[in-house]
Image: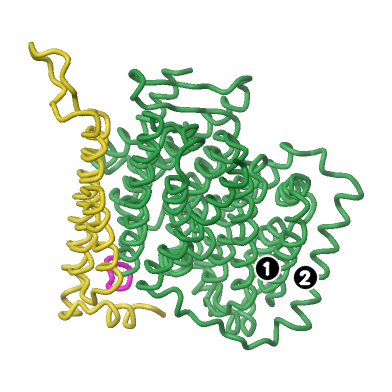
Chain colours: A green, B yellow
């Protein structure tokens, strides 16, 4: 298994470069890599005990591979496959596929590494690859959005590096387990880096602009898997060390509420989805034990929704409400929206039930509110007008835009949602089913009675570049305070 | 004492990123910040001694710890490549925004 893991990890980078040398085979290679990752993740589910690999000696690279990584790798594989299929006929150059596959490989690397330096390298490769993908259109706006992303994430990673060396100073090793017994400032600095990379709480507010202004396949990748690269190490640390667990859960609840609070008032489809990503990452963190399954569900749903949002004729909900969309598109939209609001028969339901079973008492109210907010914000999609037959003019216009690749991507992602139900089929009891249904009905009522008419526009000042950097220092103080007070209590 | 200087460098860089208006200046501030962090790694490495850990006929001297140095080498390379990438991006932006004032660029490019 050790050899297979290393070969699989190296393969995506190797093939990434090969793609550039053999441009004619680009799409086939990219799809093949995604399928290899999917096969590998299935083999992880069949494995009984977690795999620990130590390369070289004491100071070498350590890898930990278990079922949790399996869920994340499966998400990555399915999303990448869907994105490649979606782009099949759009005439993207082989450069695009090369970056996609390198991004895929580096995201996979974060899901299996177990020491801070390997994680640092993987996260930085992710920043570079996603910068190149965001700036693929080469417009001024794309370059600015990309630069802003690279700037914010690189500054955060510099703080992270200081934290990593403090862990090394305490233990003479960079492994995750070294967080225990490290000074509180080390934990605070490392967490700051990961929170920013993962788009969590206030320091994640770089995410809406970056995800909404990229092209839709790129946003699907970014929202579906890339942010999880920052979340996964947090989940892993929370599972490894019980004193970190409450901190991670606290940030989970705060993030879920913050994201959903913005999403409910948002009037733009892609920005709404991006804010909603922030909120869903909160759900992943709120119950770290079952975070893997939630991440899988969210990755599939969110990339499907981003791909659909890219095809709709407008990004503004007001305009969408005036001009009906085709029935087929609406059904895909509704399946995805139902899954994310937690409707039974789709894996979002199982994930929500599983998460709510693993919450601590103090988290319950916050998470229920966030679930209600989810139902409200996705009612915006569900209640869009739709037509069986479109007018001829529209048919021609949209017929040009929607390619068969889009439907194949939907088959992969939505099929994955239905298929992922098998992971937690025990969820289907009457008691479990009633609560999500009640939440959805309440959410729809709230939407139709209140939020549909609301014209509140939340200010965007905090999303400005300077403020994003400035918030980092505030978050650092907050984190330090949290970790420090906990440390003194436990003594 | 040295530690205080190193942290002062890191903070100078960080405040430079926030308070400088020009995009190129911001990138230089980020470089200063990363210089501070590299210096901190070197400082941590030299806690136990200053000798280079290579094979020689001297024995029992206080060696510097090679691990942080090896690690920061990776970080230097990554930092360097990111700077290069950013400067290329800034060059492209400079065509339409000759002043490179961040607030102006931001205003033009946010919806």
Q: Is residue A78 visible?
A: yes
Subunit of label 2: A
User: Is most of the magenta stretch helix, strand or loop?
Assistant: helix
Q: Dividing the picture into quarters, in which one does residue A116 lie?
A: top left
Q: Position of residue A146 (x, y in %)?
A: 33, 63
Residue labelled with disc 1: A378
Q: Residue at x 56, y 63 (%)?
A: A308
Residue B42 is a magenta residue: no
Q: Residue at x 40, y 73 (%)?
A: A467
Subunit of label 1: A
Quarter of the picture containing the C terminus of chain A is top right
Nearest to the observer: residue A408 or residue A296: A296
Vertically, is B80 above or below A376?
Answer: above
Residue A142 is a magenta residue: yes
Is circle 1 on the same chain as circle 2?
yes
| Residues rendered magenta in the picture | A138-143
Is residue A197 shown left or right of residue A147? right
Vertically, is A190 above or below A153?
Answer: above
The answer to whether the residue labelled 1 contacts the one labelled 2, judged by CB atoms less than 8 Å apart, is: yes
Q: Position of residue A224 (x, y in %)?
A: 52, 52
Q: Position of residue A95 (x, y in %)?
A: 28, 50
Q: Is residue A28 visible?
A: no
Which disc is residue A443 wearing? 2
């Amino acid at each position: 298994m050790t050899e297979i893991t290393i070969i699989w990890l190296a393969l995506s980078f190797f093939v990434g470069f090969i793609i550039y040398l053999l441009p004619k085979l680009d799409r086939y290679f990219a799809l093949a890599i995604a399928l290899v990752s999917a096969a590998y993740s299935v083999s992880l589910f069949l494995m009984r005990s977690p795999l620990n690999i130590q390369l070289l000696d004491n100071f070498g690279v350590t890898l930990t591979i278990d079922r949790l990584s399996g869920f994340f790798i499966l998400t990555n594989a399915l999303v990448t496959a869907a994105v490649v299929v979606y782009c099949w006929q759009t005439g993207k150059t082989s450069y695009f596929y090369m970056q996609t596959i390198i991004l895929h490989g580096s995201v996979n690397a974060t899901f299996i590494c177990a020491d801070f330096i390997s994680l640092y390298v993987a996260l930085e490769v992710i920043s570079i690859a996603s910068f190149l993908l965001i700036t693929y259109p080469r417009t001024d706006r794309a370059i600015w959005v990309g630069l802003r992303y690279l700037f914010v994430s690189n500054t955060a990673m510099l703080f992270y590096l200081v934290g990593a060396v403090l862990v090394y100073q305490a233990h003479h090793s960079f492994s995750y387990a070294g967080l225990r017994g490290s000074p509180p400032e080390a934990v605070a600095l490392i967490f700051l880096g990961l929170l920013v990379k993962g788009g969590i709480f206030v320091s994640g507010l770089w995410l809406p602009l970056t995800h909404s202004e990229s092209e839709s396949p790129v946003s699907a990748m970014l929202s579906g898997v890339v942010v999880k690269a920052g979340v996964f190490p947090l989940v892993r640390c929370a599972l490894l060390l019980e004193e970190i667990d409450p901190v991670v859960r606290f940030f989970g609840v705060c993030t879920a509420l913050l994201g959903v609070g913005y999403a409910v008032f948002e009037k733009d489809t892609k920005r709404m989805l991006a804010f909603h990503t922030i909120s869903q990452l909160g759900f992943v963190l709120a119950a770290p034990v079952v975070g893997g399954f939630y991440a899988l569900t969210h990755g599939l749903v969110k990339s499907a929704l981003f791909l659909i949002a890219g095809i709709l004729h407008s990004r503004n909900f007001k305009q969408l409400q005036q001009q009906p969309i085709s029935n087929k598109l609406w059904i895909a939209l509704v399946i995805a929206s139902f899954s994310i609001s937690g409707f039974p028969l789709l894996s979002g339901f199982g994930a929500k039930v599983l998460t709510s079973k693993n919450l601590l008492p103090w988290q319950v109210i916050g998470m229920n509110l966030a679930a209600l907010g989810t139902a409200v914000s996705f009612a915006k999609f569900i209640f869009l007008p739709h037509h069986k037959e479109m007018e001829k003019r529209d048919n021609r216009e949209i017929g040009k835009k929607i390619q068969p690749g889009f439907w194949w991507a939907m088959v992969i992602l939505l099929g994955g949602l239905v298929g992922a139900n098998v992971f937690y089929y025990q969820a289907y009891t009457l008691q479990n089913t009633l609560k999500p249904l009640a939440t959805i009905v309440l959410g729809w009522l709230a939407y139709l009675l209140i939020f549909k008419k609301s014209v509140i526009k939340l200010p965007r000042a905090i999303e400005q570049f300077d403020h994003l950097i400035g918030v980092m220092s505030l978050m650092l103080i907050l984190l330090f305070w949290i970790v420090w007070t906990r440390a003194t209590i436990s003594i | 004492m040295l530690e205080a200087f190193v942290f002062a460098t890191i903070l100078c860089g960080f405040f430079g990123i926030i308070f400088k208006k020009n995009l190129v200046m911001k990138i230089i501030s980020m470089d200063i910040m990363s210089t501070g962090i590299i210096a901190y790694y070197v400082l941590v490495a030299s806690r136990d001694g200053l000798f280079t850990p290579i094979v020689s006929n001297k024995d029992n001297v206080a060696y510097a710890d090679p691990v942080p140095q090896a690690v920061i080498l990776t970080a230097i390379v990554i930092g360097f490549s990111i700077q290069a990438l950013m400067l290329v991006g800034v060059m492209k932006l400079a065509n339409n925004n000759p002043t490179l004032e961040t607030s102006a660029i931001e205003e033009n490019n946010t919806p």
